[in-house]
Amino acid sequence: SRLRTRTIVTERKTVLYCSNNRPERKSCPPSPPPDTGTSTLGTEDGSSSASATTSKNKMRFRNFDEMLQQYHDRPVLVSWNAKWCGPCRLMKKELKAVRDALKDDVLVANVDTEKFPSLGARYKVEGLPTVMLFKDGETVHRIEGFESANEIIRQVRDYL
């Protein structure tokens, strides 16, 4: 079946948002069963290592916490997404522009919440796409729903 998302219009902006934790949103597929493993970040090929991308390099980590610890001196922008999420697919292009613009200042990483639901639950990710900025291993800012690259850059620069 085709995924349908809702567009929510607020006073400030229009938000493309998909949530499995809110019963009134029936357009999203059901959440996958929770995983029982440790909180790890995986790659597209299903390996159990973490990956983050800078402008041209792909780095691998054993788990999410290791990545945050290694980059404690540099902000990490994490995109929480899923393959079935339409707004998440739109957000990939925006995050590439963010990565290119802030490549010297911020590490950009992706987490597939379908593969690692316990990691999403740990950080209370209730809707997709969600983008979180981490500094010193702690969450300092959260963006829920689709945002343009320029808006993400504007918000992230406030924390640099």
Image (cartoon, rainbow, N blue to C red):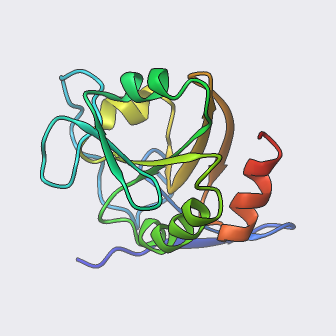
Q: Is residue 17 left or right of residue 23?
A: right
Quick one: which residue is furthest to the bottom in this view?
2
Viewport quadrant of the C terminus: top right
Quick one: which residue is furthest to the right in this view?
11
Residue 76: x and y in percent read: 56, 39
Res 151 → quadrant: bottom right
Res 11 → quadrant: bottom right
Which residue is more in the foreground, 9 or 82? 82
- Residue 38 position (above or below residue 150): above
Write the residue at 12% across / 53% down: 45
Which residue is more in the foreground, 84 or 50? 50
- Residue 152 position (above or below residue 112): below
Residue 97: x and y in percent read: 58, 70
- Residue 140 position (above or below residue 151): above
Q: Is residue 92 left or right of residue 146?
A: left
Write the residue at 24% across / 32% down: 34
